[in-house]
Image (cartoon, grey):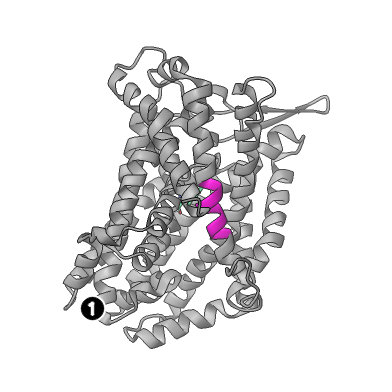
């Protein structure tokens, strides 16, 4: 995706480009979906929320709610071909405030970037720690101390976050997302293969079967409101939906793209990566006696341990964190694109100005999050540190609420006739059955489920 900015007679015009091929659109979308969510959030949340039961609920949320929202977003974005806020404003009947959903999306993008850039910073730091060889240990205590030292150092936390921000800003400014997308498409299969290798090593460790049981044998008595809320939040976070990212990417999508098919393939591929990460991590957690409920540190203590116990582990560890850094970069680019597209298209800002504004916003708002394991560790709001609060607010409130509005908007305002026209590419595709199913989901099933989860969180029941 690239944008050419033309300036003439002081007027700021943006000529919109589109993805050049159907595969390019899929790669970009997958590049946004696959990220730290798969290798960091998915395992840590599965670990803290009871394993297989959580996985099962997450799967259900992804299929019944995530996919319809993703299809809706891409479709709405493609219809209007503008940033998320403009998309809502243009499609909304007069005097209805749907544009606010887009505004909430831009706010959510900031919230996510505040903590995401921090975790990405840890990943970048681990590349260098990998090179020094210091992370390769199978001793749980040494491994967690090492990670603890990194995140409790205020200066290092900020510096790594800023390094990530500079990198992302640089790439987004030059509009070379085409470059990075090309790189991501080539490297994503390598990440996949590497996860398979780590997975096999992890599964063949003595005592690994406990880990597989933890991941795949559900105990349905463990389903609770919290499990459902968390799983729904992860489903939104994973597919980059509920806050305008997919809408923005949809706006660069070609008119001949098969939207439901693309979204389904992206969802499945993304799920595969998460499952592979789970298979790489959980057997090792049990084999080495790490704590499954360790949360965010899981990736940084267990993955190095698995590498430490295999031949050429030193090299694999470095490659792994490089690939994780690349995956997180693809996701961050898509997050950045939401405020940048909005600012540059509606606020008379150049792309560069929009990027600098966004980056500065994250430097300011992101600092308390980055320092949440050191200087601001004792500052809590609703019992959560800034890091956890931003994570919670975005995944569990902004995105589901945004997703709910997107479903209602698509099903009831955009309406079934336009859905049929758009999803069949004006009758060119023969996918009537899928469209009917989608319409029922988006009008009734998905919004009701999301509303129930949100109401449950507010303790209405
Ligand atoms: N899906 C990405 C991941 O799993 C993160 C991400 C990118 C995202 N863009 C987003 C999350 C938009 C929510 C909204 O790492």
The residue lying at 43 percent from left, 15 percent from top is 421
Residue 18 appears in view: no
Q: Main secondary structure of the magenta part?
A: helix
Left or right: where 122 falls relative to 63: right
Q: Nearer the viewer, residue 325 or 297?
A: 297
Residue 11 inside the magenta-drawn segment:
no
Measured from the top left, where is residue 196 in percent x and y? 25, 60
Answer above or below: position of 419 versus 128.
Answer: above
Q: Nearer the viewer, residue 107 or 269?
A: 107
Query: Magenta segment: does it hold 391?
Result: yes
418 left or right of 136 in image:
right
- The residue closer to the viewer here, 184 or 122, is 122
Residue wearing tag 1: 287
Looking at the rendering, which quadrant does residue 131 occupy?
Answer: bottom left
Which stretch did the figure color magenta?
Answer: 390-399
Instruction: Identify the residue at image location x=19%, y=69%.
Output: 203
Horizontal side of 358 relative to 27 (left or right) equals right
| Residue extending farthest front | 461
Residue 24, x across and y down, in percent: 42, 35
Across and down, in percent, residue 362 comes to 67, 57
Residue 258 rendering spot, x and y as whole percentages = 37, 25
Outermost residue toward the top in this view: 427
Nearest the viewer among 16 and 84 is 84
């Amino acid at each position: 995706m690239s944008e050419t900015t033309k300036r003439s007679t002081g007027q700021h015009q943006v000529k919109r480009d589109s993805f050049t091929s159907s595969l390019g659109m899929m790669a970009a979308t997958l590049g946004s979906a696959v990220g730290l969510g798969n290798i960091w959030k998915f395992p840590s949340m599965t670990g803290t929320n009871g394993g297989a039961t959580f996985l099962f609920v997450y799967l259900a949320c992804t299929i019944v709610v995530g996919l319809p929202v993703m299809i809706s977003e891409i479709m709405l974005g493609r219809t209007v071909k503008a940033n998320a806020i403009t998309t809502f404003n243009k499609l909304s009947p007069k005097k209805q405030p749907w544009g606010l959903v887009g505004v909430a999306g831009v706010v959510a993008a900031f919230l996510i970037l505040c903590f995401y850039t921090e975790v990405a910073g840890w990943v970048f730091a681990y590349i260098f720690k990998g090179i020094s060889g210091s992370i390769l240990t199978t001793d749980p205590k040494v491994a967690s101390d090492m990670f603890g030292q990194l995140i409790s150092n205020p200066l290092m936390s900020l510096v790594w976050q800023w390094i990530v921000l500079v990198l992302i800003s640089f790439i987004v400014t030059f509009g070379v997302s085409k470059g990075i997308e090309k790189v991501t498409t080539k490297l994503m299969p390598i990440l996949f293969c590497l996860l398979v290798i780590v997975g096999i090593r992890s599964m063949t460790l003595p005592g690994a079967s406990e880990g597989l049981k933890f991941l795949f044998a559900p105990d349905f008595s463990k389903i609770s409101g919290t499990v459902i809320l968390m799983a729904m939040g992860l489903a939104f976070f994973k597919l980059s939906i509920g806050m305008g990212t997919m809408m923005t990417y949809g706006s660069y999508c070609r008119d001949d793209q098969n939207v439901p098919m693309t979204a389904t393939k992206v969802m499945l591929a993304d799920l595969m990566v998460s499952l592979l990460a789970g298979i790489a991590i959980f057997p090792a957690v049990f084999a080495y006696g790490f704590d499954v409920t360790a949360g965010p540190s899981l990736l940084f203590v267990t993955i190095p341990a698995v590498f430490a116990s295999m031949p050429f582990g030193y090299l694999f560890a470095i490659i792994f964190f490089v690939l994780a850094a690349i995956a997180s970069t693809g996701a961050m680019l898509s997050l950045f694109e939401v405020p940048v597209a909005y600012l540059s298209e509606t606020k008379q800002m150049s792309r560069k100005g929009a990027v600098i504004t966004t980056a500065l916003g994250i430097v300011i708002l992101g600092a308390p999050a980055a320092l949440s394991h050191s200087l601001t560790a004792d500052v809590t709001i609703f019992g959560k540190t800034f890091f956890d609060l931003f994570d919670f607010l975005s995944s569990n409130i902004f995105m589901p609420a945004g997703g709910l509005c997107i479903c209602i908007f698509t099903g009831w305002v955009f309406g079934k006739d336009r859905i049929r026209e758009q999803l069949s590419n004006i009758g060119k595709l023969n996918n009537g059955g899928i469209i009917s199913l989608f319409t029922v989901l988006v009008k009734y099933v998905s919004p009701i489920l999301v509303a129930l989860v949100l109401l449950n969180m507010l303790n209405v029941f």
